[in-house]
Amino acid sequence: MNSYFLAFKSGFGFLSTIPVGISMEGIDELMKKIYFYPVVGAVLGLLIGAVAFIGQVIFPGPVLAALLMGFIYYITGFNHLDGVTDIGDGFMAHGSREKKIKALKDTTIGTGGVSFCILLLLTLYSSIRAVQQVGSATFGVNLPTLMFASMFIAEVSAKQSMLTIAAFGKPIPPQEKQAYPGLGAMTINGATRKNFLIGLVFGAIVCFLPFGWIGLLPYLGACISALVILNRSYAHFGGLNGDGIGTANEIGRVTALIVLAVLLNFSLNGYTGGLKWTLL
């Protein structure tokens, strides 16, 4: 099988619940060509965006926001959200770095993990609703198109956030000898500067198309959020693992939607200057 096709296919097996099949050979190829992360994000974004477009025509706003959240996790799985709970436990653990890492890797969920997860889900719901509400006043009958573009940009941004945090991160020093690296370490090793730049340029191009120049700001905001998470991961754990990478995915998606909502609000109040929307 062509190595590029195998890497692309494995991206769906690794980053979504789409039953394409996955193998260690496929994972190895994906890690070598990890710039496929935002490419897979673009395809997933098209699917989520299509649901958002159709749903905006059929359902009331609050119902659609909840349904969109359900569809996002139906098609992408809960693995990255599990990373949020683990990171939350590690961040909230008191004591030495070793104790924080132990809490991070513990299979049980504590108060910190539950709280982080709830806050993340509430923020995701609120950001979708904010785009709907402010976008309704800004775009009117074009709101379904806006929702399609917003969810598309958010998913591309989420996947590029994972690539960004991995490209600039180093694995948490192992507490004990390991026979082979974990998926987090494999992702970090695969996220070379070259692969990062390829993914960054691809994501920038596809996020530019729906909104013009203003479409780049949510994308870049998500990438910056990944660097903030990396900074906190270094402060607490001395490095990065798969949970931090998964957390970057979840927070990157939310960050992109929040930036979009803010930009829409500025547009509504006439503060966007020369930056023009291209959906009208």
Image: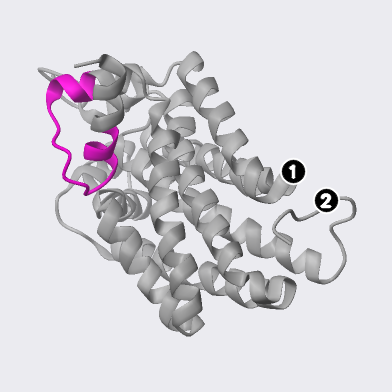
**For residue 164, side relative to residue 95 (left or right):** right
Report x, y in % for residue 13: 21, 38
Q: Is residue 71 above or below residue 197?
A: below
Q: Say which mark, if any, is on residue 244.
A: none
Report the front residue among 217 and 105: 217
Circle 1 crowding by C-alpha within 10 Å: few under 14, some 14–19, many from 20: some
Q: Say which mark, if any, is on residue 275.
A: 2
For label 2, the SS is: loop
Name which residue lies at 73% across and 53% down: 278
Q: Which residues are magenta?
A: 11-28
Name which residue lies at 29% across and 36% down: 242
Q: Pick whichever of labels 2 and 1 is earlier in the sequence.
A: 1
Report x, y in % for residue 240: 37, 32
Does residue 187 appear anywhere in the picture?
A: yes
**For residue 22, side relative to residue 173 (left or right):** left
- The residue indicated by pointer 1 is 213
Report x, y in % for residue 7: 28, 24
The reply to whether dot 2 and dot 1 touch (C-beta < 8 Å) is yes
Q: Is residue 48 above or below residue 190?
A: below
Name which residue lies at 38% across and 48% down: 44
The type of colouring in the image is one colour
What amino acid is at disc 1?
Trp
